[in-house]
Image (tube, rainbow, N blue to C red):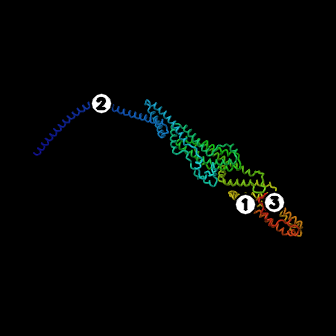
Amino acid sequence: MGVAQAMEALTERASLMKKSLQKSQTITDNMVGILGSFDHRLSALETAMRPTQIRTHSIRRAHENIDKALKAAEVILDQFELTRKAEAKILRGPHEDLESYLEAIDQLRGTIKFFSNTKMFKTATGVISHAHNLLSKALSKLEDEFRQILQNYSKPMEPDRLFECLPSNLRPSSEGESGGGSAKSHDPHNKCLENAIFTVPTVIPPRVLPLLHDLAQQMVQAGHQQQLFKTYRDTRAAVLEQSLRKLGVERLSKDDVQRMQWEVLEAKIGNWIHYMRISVKLLFAAEKKICDQILDGVESLRDQCFAEVTANSVAVLLSFGEAIAKSKRSPEKLFVLLDMYEIMRELQPAIELVFGSKPCTEMKESAMNLTKRLAQTAQETFADFEEAVEKDATKTAVMDGTVHPLTSYVINYVKFLFDYQSTLRLLFQEFDSKDPDSELGAVTTRIMHALQNNLDGKSKQYKDAALTQLFLMNNVHYIVRSVRRSEAKDLLGDDWVQIHRRIVQQHANQYKRVSWAKILQCLTVQSSGSGPVENSNISRASVKDRFKTFNSQFEELHQRQCQWTVPDSELRESLRLAVAEVLLPAFRSFLKRFGPMIESGKNPQKYIRFSPEDLERMLNEFFEGKTWSEPKR
């Protein structure tokens, strides 16, 4: 019963579920039908709306095109406005506001570029042509402005301003030297020139340089390089040449140099040395500096400009050096040639730095060639000097046997040479000398040898053999003393000095023998044998003759040799003492032996006219160089 009821209940439920499913299916089918009806209606609506959508899209595209056109027109109008403003600035010129003027030029270039890329614009060609005309006028004014500013601020340098830029030891003295003297670098106070500070002068105010640079850049961009080059070169070259003229630089030819008196030429050479240093270290360095700043970024134009600005000034300076190097050689020119060679060597690094670019090659090579030419001329003058010393044919003899002018000239010459030791070493190295010190020693030895040969020849002019020996003694002694007191001693060596000291002594001994041998024979009485005779074996008459002969010869020697000169006081006293050591003992001995024989007769003072003290006093008057008119002491 229970099961049957359960089954019946289950069946009823299943039946209800079936009815429910059938009803849901019916509803689903109805919904599908309704939805299908909607789809059909939507398709119809879409078809009806499509023309409207197309019209809306077209309107939107039209609006977008209108926006684009308006924006393009706005850009074009902006260009017109900018061009109008640029034109106004161009017409006003660059004087009022150069920076705005340069901006206007840049704007014109931008306008030309803009319309060149907008060829569909009907009036683009006209606008471009107008902008080009404006740009041409603007650049013409710009060129005038560059020229005006450069000329206004390009003034020749006053010498005083340049002197202030030199190291203190190279500035002119307070006496007002026009060129500051030669300022020889071999002088002791100039041995530190390598570390000396040269202050490059300001030739154009620093605040103006950026403006000139900007103007130059604009001209280059416009293709006006040649106008820029000519304006810069002509202006700065003229100012540089004026600065040199104010300093004292002048163009002199070889003929001008040959016609000058030596004193005048020597002064001009000293000034030239100073001018070279000022030009290279200050003026040319300053020109290089401003040229690099104004024409920065245009290397080829910059280097060519600098080369042509300085070319004429360099040529004027070097032409004087060439004229000296090619002029007739003479011994006195050697030292100025060495000075000139010295300054060229000193300036060589600065020349290579300032004139290092390719366009400056010719000037740099000209300077190097002058250096070599000066070295060659100096060496040839050196050789000429050696030859001139040996062949000097001066007929003027020194009558008193003193130091010959040639000797003092040559010795002073050699002393001066040793002030140039470092320069001479460089000079010898120019000609591949491996040992410049040895070369200098060899040259000095040859000069000394040439001098001694010449003195030997000059000594033969004396008829008195004693004076010949005195002359040689004086001159060789002067040479030895001078060498010992100079740097020549280090090169010639102690052996050379000792040998020539012995030569001095040999000439002194020869003088004593030649001058006093004869008078000493009066005081020596010998028999036919080997020993002296006794007093009783010589007659009173013979003794009188001996005294008379002695008196006569001594007075003659005294009169003559008081006029001779031994200029060195030490040598003079030494020679007098050497004579006295021989003469006085012999006279005392003769007087002691034979004096009583005369004193016992008549007029003894007629024969015994001198006492040993008189002789000693009179010997001290020898070699004083007294003239005939001077009274005896």
Q: In this view, which residue lies farthest toward the left?
A: 1
Q: Horizontally, is 441 left or right of 520 in the view? A: left
Which residue is at the front of the view, 527 or 323?
323
Marked residue nearer the N-terminal end (3 or 2): 2
- Are dots 1 and 2 in contact, CB under 8 Å? no
On the image, the x and y values in percent for residue 176 come to 63, 50
Front position among marks 3 and 1: 3
Q: Horizontally, is 66 left or right of 551 in the view? A: left
Question: Callout 1, which amino acid?
Answer: Gln
Marked residue nearer the N-terminal end (3 or 1): 1
Residue under circle 1?
498
Spatial CA distance of label 3 from label 2 is 154 Å
Front position among marks 3 and 2: 3
- Are dots 3 and 1 in contact, CB under 8 Å? no
Q: Which of the 4 image quadrants contains residue 127?
A: top left
Which residue is at the front of the view, 407 or 296?
407
Q: Which of the 4 image quadrants contains residue 459?
A: bottom right
Q: Horizontally, is 242 left or right of 622 in the view? A: left
**Residue 559, numbered label:** 3
Up/down of 281 relative to 503, above or below: above
Location of the C terminus by quadrant is bottom right
**Residue 52, numbered label:** 2
Spatial CA distance of label 1 from label 2 is 133 Å
On the image, the x and y values in percent for residue 444 come to 70, 54
Spatial CA distance of label 3 from label 1 is 34 Å
Secondary element at image label 2: helix
